Amino acid sequence: MSQFELACAASCRIGEGPVWLPAEERLLFIDVTGRRLHRFDPRAGTLGTLAVEEDIGFVAPASGGGYIAGLRTGIWLLDEQGRRRRRVAANPVDPGTLRFNDGGIDPRGRLIIGTMDETKRDGRAGLYRLDAGGLTEIAGGLMTSNGVAFAPDGRTLYHSDTPRFIIYRRDYDPETGEAGGVREFARLDSQAADRGRPDGAAVDAAGRYWSALYEGSRVRCYDASGRLSAEYPLPARSPTMPAFGDADLKTLYVTTAQAADGSGGSLYALRVATPGLTRPAFDEEILRS
């Protein structure tokens, strides 16, 4: 396929957070406000669904089985059926107006996760590292933390602030989990007619950063210097996050959210030349070290 095609009509309110599960050859993704975990089998074309008990902004497999998830009330370990097993960190702000959002697992199995200020005015969201000491703030004053991804060597942490149209890059030490100086990686045009802005992201094996442009109907690919190298239109207004999948990691899957007219909310796929990176599971030993 040379363009994005429909992979699965998932009917999500806000489809998000795709993660390829190599052992199962399935794609895990979520419906944020629909409170669902979806598992898509691309070979069979089937979709399995599990209910979760809260709005869910992030999910990833955990080393002890089940999942690590960013829910409205905090970060939880879920069992294989999506049921809350144990809360490992509380929401650091008011869960009525702020929830956990996009995140990623670093090369050593730590969780890096952001929050979303739903008031869209106060900038109370942040980006955090989770370890045995709880949540440590990496960045504050954000509106909607998004786009978490790591360079192939683990020494660059990318993240975005969606309503501000900015993608950042930070120095990162994968051995300690410490994040260093921040630089602007890319800035999108806030005056563009479609107001496409950087949502979730993924990095490929060549170190290129793939960003879904929410309300922009496209996915952009930036090289490691921040130069725009390619752009791919999508037949849905609000793509939310890409992830590389299939056995060769050369299928770029993208989740989408429903638009005001009811369109969107499905999963799309595009075959690409460069594979993505294998994403590690969350290491539960991190919480005890």
Image (cartoon, helix red, strand yellow):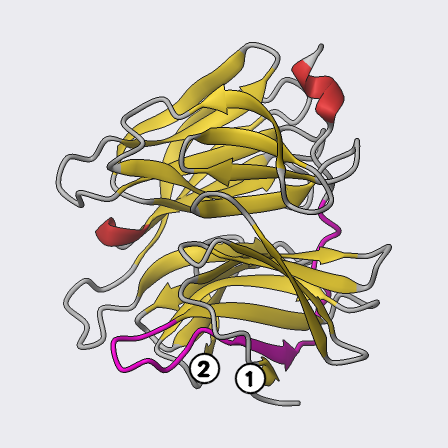
Report helix, strand or loop for mark 1. loop
Q: Is residue 29 magenta?
A: no
Tell me where residue 77 sits by quadrant.
Answer: top right
The location of residue 67, given as percent across then percent down, is 67, 40
Q: What is the number of the mark on residue 234?
A: 2
Q: Residue at x 73, y 28 (%)?
A: 283
Q: Looking at the picture, tell me which residue is in the foreground, 235 or 185.
A: 235
Give the residue at mark 1.
4
Which quadrant holds the C terminus? top right
Q: Position of residue 1 (x, y in %)?
A: 66, 89
Compute the Cα span from label 1 to label 2: 6 Å
> What secondary structure is marked by label 2?
loop
Residue 179 appears in the figure: no
Q: Residue furthest right?
A: 23
For the stretch drawn in magenta, the main secondary structure is: loop
Disc on the earlier residue, 1 or 2: 1
Q: Does the segment drawn in magenta span residue 263? A: yes
Q: Amino acid at mark 1?
A: Phe
Q: What residue is rendered at 73% in x and 44% in y? A: 80
Give the quadrant of residue 273.
Answer: bottom right
Residue 184 visible here: yes
Q: Residues within 10 Å of mark 1 (few under 14, many from 20)?
A: many
Report the side of 156 relative to 73 (left or right): right
Residue at (25, 76) in percent of width and height: 260
Residue kind at label 2, given as amino acid type? Leu
Q: Tell me which segment is drawn in magenta.
A: 258-279
Side of 72 relative to 268 (left or right):
left
Q: Nearer the viewer, residue 212 or 52?
A: 52
**Image position of 225 with respect to 60: above or below:** below
Does residue 208 lie above or below 1 as drawn?
A: above
